[in-house]
Amino acid sequence: MKTARVGIMPLEDFKRRCFDIVGGACVPEPNEPKLWFSSRKGFERALSPANRALLAEIAETEPASVSELSRTTGRARSGLSRALATLERHGLIGFEEGKGGRRAPRALYSRVELWAPPREPCPDEGARPADFR
């Protein structure tokens, strides 16, 4: 699998950066994140210890359905569904069509790196990502 490079940038800064990129005033570095969070709190919520454990379980076992994942993790299906929706919304998991029309969760990444952008809205030099697990 591959590494998810994620970044944290306030929404207004992110919007400004997108306009700069579209307008040609800024060229993003090839190693910049494709997954973004608008706050540290949102990042911490999405990648909480429980959600990281859930991602690892999905990657290791490749469950045939959400019900199977619920049984193997011991998590109630309602709470599990909310966690999976959060992970899917942030682009960390996807679903495959399983047997009988069941949705089979799949981890899209085996590793997550937190990228720390420089203070300037458009860097001249590449930023170095910080490893995060």
Image (tube, helix red, strand yellow):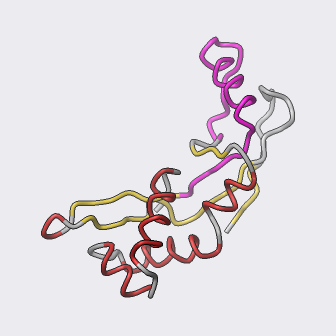
Report the side of 81 relative to 47 (left or right).
Answer: left
Q: Answer with the quarter of the image where residue 70 lies.
A: bottom left
Does residue 84 lie above or below 129 as drawn?
below
Confirm whether the magenta stretch covers residue 4: yes
Quarter of the rendering containing residue 48 = bottom right
Q: Position of residue 53 (x, y in %)?
A: 56, 77
80 lies above or below 29: below
Quadrant of the image containing the C terminus: bottom right
Which picture quadrant has residue 74? bottom left
User: Which residue is at a point 70% across and 64% down the rendered structure image?
Assistant: 132
Q: Position of residue 124 (x, y in %)?
A: 80, 27
Whether residue 129 sits left or right of residue 21 in the image: it is right
The stretch in magenta equals 3-32
Q: Please tell me whether residue 105 belongs to the stretch shown in magenta.
A: no
Give the farthest residue toward the left. 100
Q: Which residue is at 65% across, 13% downward?
A: 24
Please tell me whether residue 87 is drawn above or below residue 8 in the rendered image.
below
Farthest residue toward the right?
119
Position of residue 54 measured from the top left corner of the image (x, y, whole percent): 50, 75
Q: Nearer the viewer, residue 48 or 82?
A: 82
